[in-house]
Image (cartoon, rainbow, N blue to C red):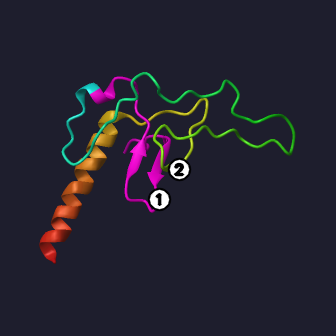
Amino acid sequence: MPPPPPSAPCCSTVPCATLGFLVPPGTADGWDMPGSACTQTAGRGLRLPADLTGGIGADARPVVPEPPVSGTGWLLPPTDTGPVTDPAVLRAALGEAARLIEAADRVR
């Protein structure tokens, strides 16, 4: 079995009504997953500072950029070297979640 994909940045509205995932530029152009949306940032995308370490030494704190959508907060913040979410993996996970929810709703 292949290893799981690396974790990618994820944000959420409070109280977790909506989840958001960072995906590569251009993903919104071909997004067609029913029950979900892929929002283009019109060139405003998330800009990561060159140095996310927040300084040097024991007191240094990571610099966490603001989420790209207002009213959200990071569940897993981005790093300067970390991956974004693979759209194919996200599409598959959302499809599986929808099938599980549908099956659970039929049992009630």
Mark-to-mark CA distance, 1 and 2: 8 Å
Q: Is residue 3 magenta?
A: yes
Q: Is residue 24 above or below residue 70?
A: above
Q: Is residue 53 above or below residue 26?
A: below
Residue that carries the numbered disc 1 in the rendered image: 14
Quadrant of the frame with the N terminus: top left
**Residue at 85 percent of width and 45 percent of height:** 59
Residue 53's spot in the image, x, y percent? 73, 35
For the stretch drawn in magenta, the main secondary structure is loop
User: Which kind of residue does numbered mark 1 sit on?
Assistant: Val
**Residue at 39 percent of width and 41 percent of height:** 2
Q: Residue furthest front?
A: 70
Quadrant of the frame with the C terminus: bottom left
Q: Residues within 10 Å of mark 1 (few under 14, many from 20)?
A: few
Q: Is residue 89 magenta?
A: no
Residue that carries the numbered disc 2 in the rendered image: 73
Q: Residue furthest left?
A: 106
Q: Residues within 10 Å of mark 2 (few under 14, many from 20)?
A: some
Task: Write down the region rendered in magenta.
Answer: 1-28
* Image quarter of residue 63: top right
For the residue pair 55 and 89, the one nearer the viewer reads as 55
Residue 16's spot in the image, x, y percent? 43, 59
* Image quarter of residue 48: top right
Whether label 1 touches label 2, CB < 8 Å: yes
- Secondary structure state at the residue bearing disc 1: loop
User: Which kind of residue does numbered mark 2 sit on?
Assistant: Gly
Q: Which mark is residue 62?
A: none
